[in-house]
């Protein structure tokens, strides 16, 4: 996940905030378990630049994924949208022999599908509802998801004081329940939209849909 904007506390020095947030991210990754890649930007420094794209492209080449899950192209935070653009472009250039990543890594050419998560609040910044293509039933693992997100403790004070989110964990549960209702089938759900295949794969390449077809 490229985007992880927002300071944990308005009174914490940036270096201390960065140390805390790094440890939280590493702890969350260990609970999946997942491979952790170090951050590439300072807080709120996620911009669509040549330098950032080269760094994200190196991560994509190293991971060589079949599935990329990233932010919604339109979301309530600008850094989420920038992270989405970087993830999409980095996935696009992963197989280009002429493109030099940072650090330089050889291109990889396997097919890949990109899926965009629903935006925070399940709507665009203009309050327009977003209708997903694909719903994932997480009813049996929502407590596990809550535990993993709970590693992000430094976010709580900041969200409470600036955005009036008294509980980011409860907000997660509420939005997952809303998506479950929207699915018409599940109590709690995550949801995604599949990116256009052009430049990434054949038209019918849908590994996430196939994996969840049952």
Image (cartoon, rainbow, N blue to C red):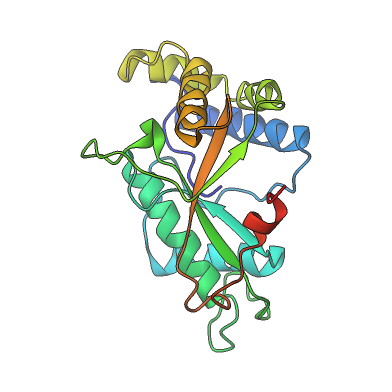
Of residue 35 and residue 126, the one placed in the foreground of this image is 126
Q: Residue at x 51, y 42 (%)?
A: 191
Above or below residue 78? Residue 144 is: above
Above or below residue 97? Residue 193 is: above
Above or below residue 57? Residue 208 is: above
Is 159 positioned to the left or the right of 170 in the image?
Answer: left
The answer to whether residue 54 of the structure is visible from this angle is: no
The answer to whether residue 83 of the structure is visible from this angle is: yes
Q: Residue at x 68, y 77 (%)?
A: 110
Total number of numbered discs in the rendering: 0
Q: Estimate the x, y position of residue 121 in percent, counting from the top left.
A: 37, 31
Q: Estimate the x, y position of residue 127 in percent, counting from the top left.
A: 24, 35
Residue furthest to the top: 166
Of residue 137 and residue 10, the one placed in the foreground of this image is 137
Q: Residue at x 51, y 51 (%)?
A: 70
Q: Estimate the x, y position of residue 101 in percent, counting from the top left.
A: 57, 74
Above or below residue 137? Residue 110 is: below
Is 186 positioned to the left or the right of 43 in the image?
Answer: right
Residue furthest to the bottom: 98
Which image quarter: residue 202?
bottom right
Of residue 199 and residue 137, the one placed in the foreground of this image is 137
Is 152 positioned to the left or the right of 108 in the image?
Answer: left
Residue furthest to the left: 126
Q: Estimate the x, y position of residue 192 in percent, counting from the top left.
A: 50, 48
């Amino acid at each position: 996940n490229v985007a992880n904007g927002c300071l944990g506390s308005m009174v914490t020095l940036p270096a201390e905030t960065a140390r805390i947030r790094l440890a939280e991210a590493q702890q969350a990754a260990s609970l999946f378990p997942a491979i952790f890649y170090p951050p590439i930007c300072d807080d709120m420094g996620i911009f669509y630049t040549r330098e950032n794209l080269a760094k994200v492209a190196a991560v994509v080449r190293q991971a060589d994924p079949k599935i990329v899950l990233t932010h919604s192209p339109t979301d309530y935070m600008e850094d989420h949208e920038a992270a989405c653009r970087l993830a999409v472009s980095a996935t696009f250039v992963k197989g280009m022999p002429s493109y030099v990543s940072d650090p330089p890594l050889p291109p990889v050419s396997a097919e890949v599908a990109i899926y965009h998560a629903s935006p925070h609040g399940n709507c665009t910044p203009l309050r327009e509802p977003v209708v997903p293509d694909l719903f994932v039933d997480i009813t049996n693992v929502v407590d596990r998801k809550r535990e993993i997100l709970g590693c992000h403790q430094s976010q709580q004070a900041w969200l409470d004081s600036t955005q009036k989110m008294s509980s980011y964990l409860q907000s997660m549960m509420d939005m997952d329940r809303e998506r479950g209702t929207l699915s018409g089938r599940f109590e709690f759900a995550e949801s995604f939209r599949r990116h256009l295949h052009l430049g990434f794969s054949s038209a019918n390449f849908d590994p996430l849909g196939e994996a969840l077809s049952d």
